[in-house]
Amino acid sequence: MRSSLAAWLFVAPALLAIAVFFVVPVAAALLMSTTDFDIYALADLRNVRFVGLGNYLHLLQRPLFWRALLNTMFFVVVGVPLSIGTSLAAALLLNSPLARLKGFYRTALFAPVVTTLVAVAVVWRFLLHTRYGLLNYGLSSLGLTPVDWLGDPRWAMPAIVLLSVWKNFGYNMIILLAGLQAIPGEMYEAARLDGAGPGALFRHITLPALAPMLLMVSILTMAGHFQLFAEPYVMTQGGPAERTVTVLYFMYEEGFKWWSLGSASSVAFVLFLFMFGFTLLQLRVSRGTGTA
Amino acid sequence: MRLPLASAGINVALALVAALTLFPLAWMVSASFMTAGEASSFPPPMLPAAATLANYRLLFAEHGIVRQALNSLLISLLATGLALAFNLSAGYAFAKLRFAGRERIFRLLLGALVIPAQVTMMPLFLMLKQMGLVNSTAGALVPWLASVFGIYLVRQYAQSIPDELLEAARMDGAGEWTLFVRVVLPVLKPIIVTLAVLTFLGSWNDFMWPLIVLTEHDVQTLPVALAVLSREHVQDVELMMAGAVITVLPVLLLFLALQRYYLQGLLVGSVKG
């Protein structure tokens, strides 16, 4: 009995903090999403009215919300595979027995992960500059046409994908590298004796061994990509032509620029539903193909 | 005979990827020492013609960046201290102490990870507004008190503590608190460093919540101040780069010094059961 009480005292502070600053706010957000909480309610709580699913239905009628969903989906669908592909390629290079200076390269490739997103977004905004940016300078010296990265509606989101891949690939690279190192060398030896080439080794040994890890990595990476906010805030402010307004950017403006906190809460829950749905979908698909 | 060629290929590829990866950071440092307007010339210069500290001086003298650097430092240090205090005891209890509903509560906590933190931002803002904590350090710290991830991290590590070690201390008459401080914490040292580094870097780099809750210039953290500055001073490339260097450098150095602990946390944390 005494030890049970002590145990409760050990967990109570953390559980209390999580209850007050997470569980209660989540419940309150759900409640708020069914009200017309706006700037008048901010001044006087008596101005709040219950609107049921009104906020959600209203969202469906707003072109900018659909635009934000579409932009976010583009970032997820294009960015996640590109990011994980880069991580896997880098991990394979680092795992090669022929590679030298592994410790140095591992640190160098991981460095962008620990940098401050806002700061590197500011840096990239200038690297992507149409006239003075070094990216276009590099492209034109290769004989390619320069691109108006952040000014052209077609290129703004791909430019943010580029920054995001650069910033994040080191994270999954470290995880996948650990996965690669856990594959026993004898498996490759045996397959090589059977005459398998590098491509076959990768497809029949490396990929199946990494599958559970790839699933986990893609679920976490996807969740991160759904939460795109700082890059458009710093680099494009949602533009050009609203092509970089993301769901969170929309939520931020709705809630903390226009003070429609009720509507912003409903946006947050739609985002949550999307993230949840896509996670389930990934689990379902991977079970279907027998990788997990 | 194919081996030397393959070896060269792989090492050249690695060197190329590393150069591309480090280039934006190197350019940031280089441009921060250029004179105003120098970066906006064609062809774009890689190195300053005559390195100057003018951008840094301007940031310190006119934009009050020292104030914001101190805000960032204070918030990150407090966040780290609080996260350690809350998560170490809870993580240990979930691993090693018995109480009713332990497994069920832990599973609930893990389940809560699917809810993105942004859902809580609107009510949390209202809550802090009622308490008069908007534009205060306390307001910025609220999300960093206890975290499911932190508890999970400590629990995973604490599970490897042998029960005999704890029992022996109990036989000697140690109370649960003494046991925790004298026996458990020393064993947990590596994961304490890991959790501390992760929390410090996480709170230093955090953007969306500080942007919402810290609206006044004097209480803002470096990332928020930099974002505001960069929206106002679009043309001042060199000044922005100096601001970016000041923001990034502390966390980059901290990472380089404690890399081993950081990467360990990343690996433990990502193998979610």
Image (cartoon, grey):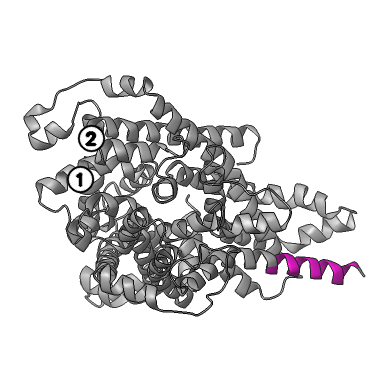
Residue at (10%, 27%) from the top-left corner?
A47
Amino acid under disc 2: Leu
Residue A261 marker: 2
- Tell me which chain the residue with mark 2 is part of: A
Q: Nearer the viewer, residue B19 or B266?
A: B19
Q: Is residue A4 visible?
A: no
- Residue assigned mark 1: B125
Residue A144 coordinates in the image, percent (x, y): 71, 50
Q: Which mark is residue B202?
A: none
- Please name the residue shown 28% across and 54% down the image: B210
Quarter of image, res A89: bottom right
Q: Are marks 2 and 1 in contact (CB under 8 Å)?
A: yes
Name the residue nearer the viewer: B35 or B178.
B35
Q: Which residues are magenta?
A: B2-15
Residue B112, located in which quarter of the rendered image? top left
Residue A233 seen in this snapshot:
yes
* Residue A20 higher or lower than A275, as above or below: below
Pick whichever, A86 or B237, lies toward us: B237
The residue at 37%/21% (across/down) is A60
Residues B193 and B215: in front is B215
Q: In which quadrant of the rendered image does the N terminus of chain A lie?
A: bottom left
Residue type at mark 1? Phe
**x, y percent for residue A129:** 53, 54
Tell me the chain of label 1. Answer: B
Q: Residues within 10 Å of mark 2 (few under 14, many from 20)?
A: many
Q: Are marks 2 and 1 on the same chain?
A: no
Residue at (20% x, 26% y) in the render: A35
Tag 1, which secondary structure? helix
What's the magenta bit mostly, secondary-structure-wise? helix
